[in-house]
Image (cartoon, rainbow, N blue to C red):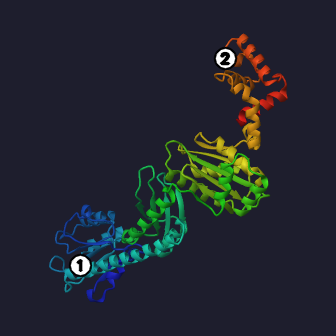
Amino acid sequence: MLVSDLAETPELGITVRVPGGEGALRRLISWCAPTESINPGPFLTPNTLMLTSGMALNVTDMRIWDAYVERLARVPIAALAFGLGPAHRSMPAGLVTACENHGVPLLEIPPQVPFVSVLRDAQDKLAAGRYEAVRRGSELADGCTRIAANGGTLQDVLHQISQDVGARVSLEDSTGATLVAAGPAGAYSGRTEFTLPGSDKNRFRLVVEEPALSPNIRMLLGPVAAVVSMQLSSTLGSAAIAHSHNAGRLTEAIYGTAAIPTDELIRLARDSELEPYQHIGVVVIEGTANATTPYLRSVAWRARVMLAGEFPHMRYVDGPELSTILVQGGEMSAGRLADLTRSAIGPSEAVSAVVAATENAAELGLTLRLARRTLGTPGVRQAPVLNFDAVVDTLSHPGVVSMARRLLAPLVRDGDGTLLKTLESYLRHSGGTSAICDELYIHRNTLAYRIRKLEELLGADLQDGQVRATLMLAVRVM
């Protein structure tokens, strides 16, 4: 109910003596409070309609009237309804001046209208407004439940809420970062927050921003907040893997196989609606030991929202511990991907993210596995273009593994594996005697003896560069 709704009720005969500031008569009334206290401020809530006959204010001192209205304006009340009668036969001039000075609407109730009639009319209108809010809230919750049941996203649900209430609606995480929003952005004076159930680490808020705060907004959106909470819990808290169409098959094939043929990669990329012969951006996000699945998914969600603003084509796969995002169509570079991901994640110490930019789908398998292997340290970093482990990935064919085992079998059969450890150290330090001896805690003569033994068992010259490279590959493959 607006102040003007009460003032324009014919049977009450109310006169607007002071309209207040601009738009003051359009203020929403949230409650009615009849009182004769000279200082009612501590007992009032914002947007209250205050009714008084001024019994305690039979004064002429302008300073008293001004202080009285100033306290009401500080609440602030919606309007002051002043009833004429035995205490005041006419409206006090000091009260009119004070209301004009402080922009408080002043309504004059004629002496023939009982105070209780105004109170009853206002309360009836407020009750009708609350009932209407509950009814609309129930219908909105039902509509949003149908959207969710039919496979709609949280974005779809928020869009429906925004359209229904005519406000901007967003979902924020515990850091205050916006995960998803609907409705035009702007500087709004009215803000209502609904804290959704969850632990402190996984606390989310449904935020409604309006040009002016609606008194019944909590009644209206209380039921639908529960729908948002359930859908959010299902989306972020599930241990099941969520993914774009066919993207799950692509990443499952890459992460689950050491080597995947190029033609298979190209086919899976096309099935995921990615162009296999164009650049593909990669973002892999993993939670640290302290990160929960809901938190990881909310961070990955923020990253997708940020990346979607620059790359028109996006595919993603969200698992309980790892999120993979593939983008295409924009200006592609690992540096740009890192900047956008860093903006989305912020200074979080609970996630590790690695980004990379591939030339085409043929590189995608190696790049994703390389990015995943680079995870671990909190923050955002770029994956190396190529390293030794990535090369080994291309050789991890079952036949190559079998041949590597056969090549190193004489060392594996050696008692406690001392010779195999010596070979690994020898290859890692490029034959540097001091470094090898320090690592293995052995004498130079012992090392010389072991090297001769290695060459004898392997039938190879360890001074030969190609022999070293072959043995290094064999060790890594195993």
Residue that lies at the very extreme toward the left in this rendered image: 86
Percent of width and height locating residue 324: 63, 53
- At a point 68% along the width and 53% down the height, the residue shown is 253
- Residue found 48% across the figure and 65% down from its top: 188
Name the amino acid type tagged 2.
Answer: Asp
Decide: is 389 above or below 278. Answer: above
Which amino acid type is marked by label 1?
Leu
**Residue under numbered circle 1:** 119
Seen in the image, is 146 located left or right of residue 456? left
Per the image, the residue denoted by label 2 is: 438
Residue at the spot 20% in from the left edge and 72% down from the top edge: 54
Disc 2 packing (10 Å; few <14; some 14–19; many ≥20): few
Q: Picture quarter containing residue 19? A: bottom left
Circle 1 sits in a helix, a strand or a loop, which is it?
Answer: helix
Query: Is residue 217 visible in this depiction of the protein?
Result: yes
Q: Residues within 10 Å of mark 1 (few under 14, many from 20)?
A: some
**Residue at x 35% of width, y 82% of height:** 5
What percent of the width, then of the height, locates residue 362? 78, 52
